Amino acid sequence: MSIELQQLIPNLYSPVIFKALTSSGPVVVDFFATWCGPCKAVAPVVGKLSETYENVRFIQVDVDKNRQVAQDMKVRAMPTFIVFKDGKPHGEPIVGGNMKALEDRIKEVA
């Protein structure tokens, strides 16, 4: 499964829609900003992870366009990855570009 780009889903600014997207199965949410250098640097790795773990849904959330969702999830830095399992965050958020930590967390829920 490729990364499901936030911009492709109209009005994903809604916390209700965000909750629906993360409510079942394993989901990785990538909170990013278009101006964020580290976000751009890890994007290819996240893309490969999305291809490797086909049973995991990957969602990107642009924090500048989805401020309410980012605030609700207490995102303070980018990139921040939150892994969900059946609607609940699994473990602490992964802040920064630690792709090994992200993959380890994905393995726990996949």
Image (spheres, rainbow, N blue to C red):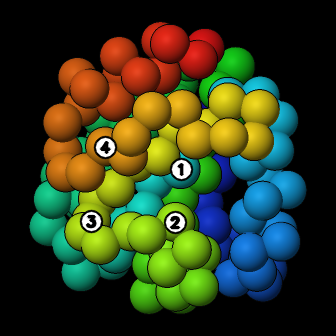
Question: Looking at the image, is mark 2 or mark 4 earlier in the sequence?
Answer: 2
Residue denoted by label 2: 73
* Residue depicted at x 43% and y 62%: 31
Q: Quadrant of the C terminus?
A: top right
Residue denoted by label 4: 94
Q: Quadrant of the N terminus?
A: top right
Q: Amino acid at mark 2?
A: Met
* Residue depicted at x 63% and y 67%: 6
Point out residue 9 in the picture as x, y percentages from the top left corner. Answer: 77, 70
Which of 62 and 25 lies nearest the eye of the viewer?
Answer: 25
Q: Where 9 sits versus 106, above or below?
A: below
Question: Which tag is nearer the camera, tag 4 or tag 1?
Answer: 4
CA neighbours of label 4 inside 10 A, class few (<14), some (14 to 19), many (20+): some
Residue denoted by label 3: 78
CA neighbours of label 3 inside 10 A, class few (<14), some (14 to 19), many (20+): many
Proximity of marks 2 and 4: CB atoms separated by less than 8 Å: no
